[in-house]
Amino acid sequence: MGYQLNFAPVWRDFDLLLSGLALGIGMALVAVLLVGNLIGLVAAFAMTSKSALLRRIAGIYVTTIRNLPIYFLMLVAFFVLPQQLGVRIDKVHAFVGTLSIYAGAYLTEVYRGALLALPKGLREAGLAIGLTESQTRIWIIIPVMVRNALPALSNNFISLFKDTSVAAAIAVPELTFYARQINNNTFRVIEVWSVCSLMYVAACYLIAAGLRFAERRLAIPH
Amino acid sequence: MDFTRFFSDLWIARFALAEGIGMTLVISGIAIILGTLLGIGVALSLVYGGKIQRFITRIFLEYVRGTPVFVLILACYYLLSGVIQLTPFQAGLIALTVFCSSHVGENLRGALLALPKGQTEAGKAIGLTFRQNFIYVLAPQALRQALPAWINTAAELVKASTLLAVIGVVELMLTTRQIIAIKPRPLEFYFVAGLIYFLICFSIERFGRAVERRIALPS
């Protein structure tokens, strides 16, 4: 085969690839760790609440989102909703919104599991020392529950970070988008896709290492 | 919203939609079968392979698991259609198969390694060869362990297959977009597509849970 490897065109645009990777990580941080986490916490409490209506709503949210492809949700958020509501949504905002709602459903399951695994005595102890129900929740239940849920949280974070590549399909300038652009401009097919996928692998590795470090630091000692 | 008009549009589009659903199911189905076979190979070589074989398989697995499935699809499409002429269907099928094999491989490896050592030893003690031991003792237990997660992988594949629309495989997602280009009712037709995806994935998930309850080892 007369194919000569030539990485020069890829290195020339390497800063673009790096900025794309940074955008992907940034979108994952905002959507998953910030908004998705919040949704997950609230929905997990709703799922375990006494009110049947709240349980119902949270249950429908989780089941619906978990059984829909993220590509579908993204297209709805970017093409259908703005048109129906008569507004313009920036594509990055549309994707971050999509990923937040998507991540929220997965994190709800994580937190629901963590919540159910907590010993009953924890809440009772909080109430016994005179904290109100919501104080107990904020100062006792959530810190313990989040620390217990950290390993599951990092797994989800990595898989949701990989989902940011889907944003390339609506031209969000992240890593996959730039890889495609370089691919189309230079036809350095092997080079650009090997570099792109290696960057994802490396990013996943680094994120995993960082999260494992955080897990060890924050784990509840036994 | 004019429902009768929408339903007449839906009726006109019924064959296209059916073909899209068919394509989604066919490509996911073939990918699951091929990916499972490849995944079994991956798991076996990770657990029983020699040092070099284990190392190479490990690299393959880590590489595929660290790469987003969308990048796998695009890479297969651009790479393979440049080297050997491949249709989008074939390129997409290869990408989904590789994706599936990484899930199945990791899952089965976990199941095999989770088996207590005593199982192998007991097999040896009653005089089974390694092959007999694997077929009659280890494999049935590992498969039982791995089955629920394997069914989940099927739902993952159906969801990942939507990305094939980008490389031009006319599955349900691309069909929906094509229909909307002719009959501009995005809200309604996206709703229909979402409903179909939901029903497919939801039934797979429910089926997985039922299987999980059915085959749970009594403890």
Image: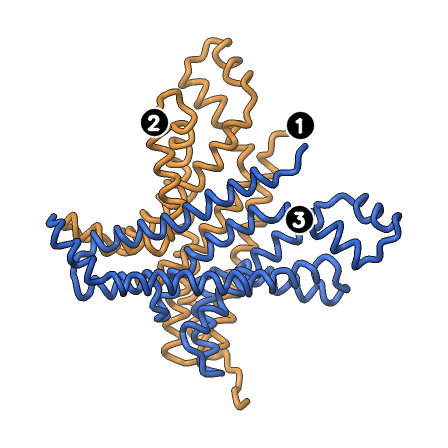
Chain colours: A orange, B blue
Q: Are marks 3 and 1 in contact (CB under 8 Å)?
A: no
Please, which chain is the residue tagged with disc 2 on?
A
Q: Position of residue B198 (x, y in %)?
A: 36, 48
Q: Are marks 2 and 1 in contact (CB under 8 Å)?
A: no
Q: Given the image, on which type of amino acid does mark 3 rest?
A: Ala
Q: Position of residue B156 (x, y in %)?
A: 46, 53
Q: Given the image, on which type of amino acid does mark 1 rest?
A: His
Question: Which residue is painted at 47% across and 27% down in the image?
Answer: A142
Q: Which mark is residue B169?
A: none
Q: Position of residue B6 (x, y in %)?
A: 15, 54
Say which residue label 3 marks: B111
- Which numbered disc, 2 or 1, marks the residue closer to the eye? 2
Q: Given the image, on which type of amino acid does mark 2 rest?
A: Leu
Please, which chain is the residue tagged with disc 3 on?
B
- Which numbered disc, 3 or 2, marks the residue closer to the eye? 3
Say which residue label 2 marks: A54
Residue B161: image quadrant is bottom left
Q: Position of residue B59 (x, y in %)?
A: 63, 64
